Amino acid sequence: MSSSTEFLSDFKDATQSVISTRRPWPQFLSLSSLSLPSSFSDATTRITHNFTFFLFNYTLIFLLILLLTLLPHPLSILTFVALFAAWYFLYLAREGDEPLNLFNLVALNDLAVVVGLGFVTVVAMFLTNAWVNVVVSVIVWGLVVCFHGALRGTEDLVVDDHDSPYGPMLSGNPPPSAGAGAGAGSYTRL
């Protein structure tokens, strides 16, 4: 049970970290920052770095693409807006580990809320025939992310080491598991 609690806590933390990566749209769309990558390795590094740095912007682009693919299906749009609101208010915006109280009769923990919302989301996708639109949206979004991420240079982006996709490998500090005597430049021969 603790692993599912940890998963839900990690999921909530990840969602809140996406919101914390809001970047200004002029910085995201800066034409002066566009350039061709020098190699495939450079392109993948740029995509990874830009995805980490502009995660909130990419998420909003996904929601816009999803909305555009659902335009011919207004019932699906209303259903997804209601589902997004339900996910936000019933799960993401709640404080800490407090259970969700339904009419002061039933207290639901995070696991019950996620399972319930997940089930309702999947059923709604199939009942409104929106699952094809979601798949198409994900594919188009992936192409947009890869195209923008590969072309946008990362030289002007300032990111903390812990926010980098490469994490502590870029910092001069030893990893937390290193012993007290191990420094940034000390290695052990095998």
Image: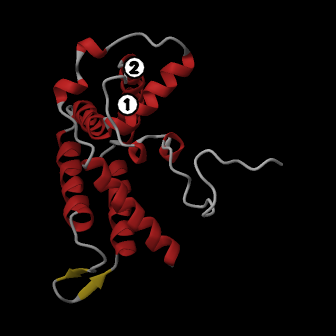
Pick the front one: 132 or 5: 5
Q: Residue at the spot x=50%, y=40% of the render?
A: 170
- In the image, residue 187 sits, relative to residue 59, either above or below, namely below
What's the residue type where badge 2 is placed?
Phe
- In the image, residue 101 sits, relative to residue 174, either above or below, namely below
Which numbered circle lies on residue 50?
1
Task: Indicate the position of residue 137 as horizontal and vertical percent values.
Answer: 35, 33
Left or right, residue 59 beside residue 183: left
Q: Quadrant of residue 51?
A: top left
Q: Residue at the spot x=26%, y=33% of the render?
A: 61
Q: Are marks 1 and 2 in contact (CB under 8 Å)?
A: no
Q: How is the image coloured?
A: secondary structure
Pick the front one: 144 or 85: 144
Q: CA distance from mark 1 to mark 2?
A: 11 Å
Left or right, residue 10 beside residue 68: right
Residue at the spot of label 2: 147
Whether residue 136 is visible to the viewer of this picture, yes or no, is no
Whether residue 75 is visible to the viewer of this picture, yes or no, is yes
N-terminal of the pair, mark 1 or mark 2, is 1
Which numbered circle lies on residue 64?
none
Task: Indicate the position of residue 142 as horizontal and vertical percent values.
Answer: 41, 30
What's the residue type where badge 1 is placed?
Asn
Most extreme residue toward the bottom is: 105
- In the image, residue 115 sits, relative to residue 124, either above or below, namely below
